[in-house]
Image (cartoon, rainbow, N blue to C red):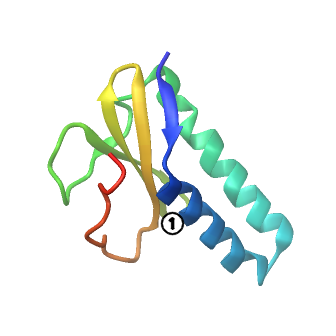
Amino acid sequence: MAQINWTHNAIEDIYNAMEYLRYFSDKYAELFADGIFERVEILERFPRSGRIVPEFENEHIRELIHKSYRIVYHIIEDEKIDVLTVHPSALPFGGALFSET
């Protein structure tokens, strides 16, 4: 089974999304975060289950979709995965996606 490493950027992204969602509902913000973590659990057994991120065209940079967010991860090796960002799908990627890899 693969080890999942959550980068500081990815955790901060979740926190920021939760802060925004709390304006509407504390419960929804918590459910959103729980859903992100649950979605990523599949990578422990199936690290290549996400699609290749089209912007990078690198088979080791993949994404899962949860609601309107892209969970981008880097397969270091089949036993080690870094979650890089949890990014709103409506926004383009910035330049610092790989700062922690």
Residue 95 horizontal side relative to residue 7, left or right: left
Task: State the residue lying farthest toward the top.
Answer: 1
The residue lying toward the viewer, choosing from 7 and 63, is 7
Q: Position of residue 7 (x, y in %)?
A: 48, 49
Task: Give the amino acid at mark 1.
Answer: Ser
**Quarter of the view holding residue 92:** bottom left
| The C terminus lies in quadrant | top left
Q: Position of residue 56 (x, y in %)?
A: 18, 54
Q: Which residue is mark 1?
A: 68
Q: Is residue 63 above or below residue 14?
A: above
Q: Which residue corresponds to the image point at 42% horizontal and 40% vertical from the top-left?
A: 82
Q: Pinpoint residue 44: horizontal percent, then vertical percent.
A: 51, 25
Most distant residue in the left direction: 57
Residue 84 position within the rendered picture, expressed as x and y whole percent measured from the top left: 41, 51
Could you say which quadrant of the image residue 47 lies in? top left
Q: From what the image shows, is residue 19 above or below residue 67?
A: below
Residue drawn 69% across the image and 59% down it: 32
Circle 1 residues within 10 Å: few <14, some 14–19, many ≥20:
few
Instruction: Please state if 87 lies on the left or on the right of 75 as rendered.
Output: right
Residue positioned most to the bottom: 23
Q: In this rendering, would 19 be left or right of 80?
A: right
What SS does tag 1 mark? loop
Q: Residue at x 71, y 49 (%)?
A: 34
Which residue corresponds to the image point at 41% horizontal and 69% vertical from the top-left? 89
Res. 21 image quadrant: bottom right
Residue 10 vertical placement versus 91 (above, below): above
